[in-house]
Amino acid sequence: MEVREIDIHEDAEVRAWWEVSKAADAYGREEYVSFWSLRAATASLRAPNNSMCQVPLAAFEGREIVGVDQLHYPLLDNTHLSYVSPLVLPEHRRRGIGSALLETSLDLIRQLGRTTALCEVNLPLDEQATSPGLDFARRHGFEVGILDLHRVLSLPVEPGSLDALEAQAAAHHRAYSLESWIDTVPDEHLRGYCDLQTAFNSEAPSGDLEYEDEAWDEERVRSAEKRHEQQGRRMAATVAIDPEGAVVGLTEMVSTEETHEFAWQGGTLVLKSARGHRLGMAMKVANLRLFETMMPSCRSVHSWNAEANGPMVAINDALGFQPVERLAEMQLKL
């Protein structure tokens, strides 16, 4: 067996790496999977990215890929962090392939001078349940930093339900306004959008994970938008604006042209200074309406929220999101 980085400019090798990633991620949880498209994965590996470096590793037996690991690490902020995601085809597990992939990643991380490795592990919904992935991560020294709930919303949502939620929230935020857009952040909201993205790590629950604020500016946003266009990615976004004109809330929903049947709920944040006005609900309702107009063939939205984030969980409950599994965000101090 050989573990090495794949050739991202070789179409067949990228496809094989993506197919193994998708199959290994889906095993045992097929009905909950929302995996990115081959186009999106290929563009992510090849397109310029000024904020994140990606190292796609694979375990080869001969010419066959039997396991993968995507190592990636931030370039503009959180330079102590790195992310790993070792996955092995089910028929090749318990042969040391996952450990070989992970150790290769950790060696690279140490060479980079990074001090913390992060990974994500899917878990059954039962709070007492474990999983092979969790056992594997713990054997290698990872500890749970925070637990998330994976929830799914079936689309389309009954319009009357959205009308009622919108009306209930409206009385609480009359001094605020909402604005929405598709794909491209308007110039007039760019500074506020960057400020909200910067604030996520310090204002949203992160448990024991040691995140720093991210660094967002126009170059990072516009670079990401160009990459998203190559990926076939479509995004609906809504912001809340306070009486002084400052952006104080943001929510995003994303899908791709190839995987239009499902979507991902992106980050939703209301700054602490503006909470208590039902802006989270108002933004999500407005954004869901926009998204359903943009992607009418979408049939489900996947969302991950920290279990400790009671207000956001309550909003998702009211919208009709149903819990399907849990996600452990884990970290290893090197």
Image (cartoon, grey):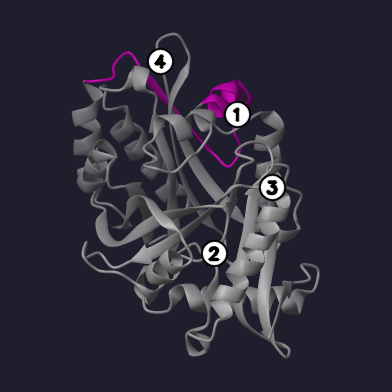
Are the residues at dot 2 and dot 3 in contact (C-beta closer than 8 Å)?
A: no
Q: Which amino acid does label 2 sit on?
A: Ser
Give the side of residue 87 with respect to residue 107, left or right. left
Res. 242 mark: 4
Q: 215 and 248: which one is in front?
A: 215
Who's the residue at 55% across and 58% down the image? 256
Which mark identifies residue 186? 1
User: Is 321 on the left or on the right of 196, as rendered?
Assistant: left
Q: Which residue is drawn at 68% across and 86% down?
A: 1
Visible residue check, residue 40: no
Which disc, if any, is residue 85? 2
**Residue in the image at 26% along x and 44% along y:** 313
The structure residue drawn at horizontal position 49% and vertical position 58%, both measured from the top left corner, is 119
Task: Name which of mark 4 and mark 2 comes first in the sequence.
Answer: 2
| Mark 3 or mark 1, whichever is nearer to me | 3
Q: Is residue 73 left or right of residue 193?
A: right
Residue 113 - label:
3
State the CA–CA distance, disc 3 to disc 1.
Answer: 37 Å
The x, y position of residue 276, in whole percent, is 25, 22
Q: Tell me the SS state at disc 2.
A: loop
Image: magenta residue range: 172-195
Which one is earlier in the sequence, the residue at label 1 or at label 2?
2
In whole angstroms, how far apart are the C-alphas of marks 2 and 3? Answer: 19 Å
Which picture quadrant has residue 310?
top left
24 to 172, vertically: above or below:
below
Counting from the top left corner in percent of width and height, residue 268 is at: 40, 38
Give yes or no for contact between labels 1 and 4 (Cβ–Cβ under 8 Å). Answer: no
Foreground mark, 4 or 3? 3
Q: Which of marks 1 and 4 is nearer the N terminus?
A: 1
Type of amino acid under label 4: Asp
Closer to the camera: disc 1 or disc 2? 2
Q: Is residue 261 magenta?
A: no
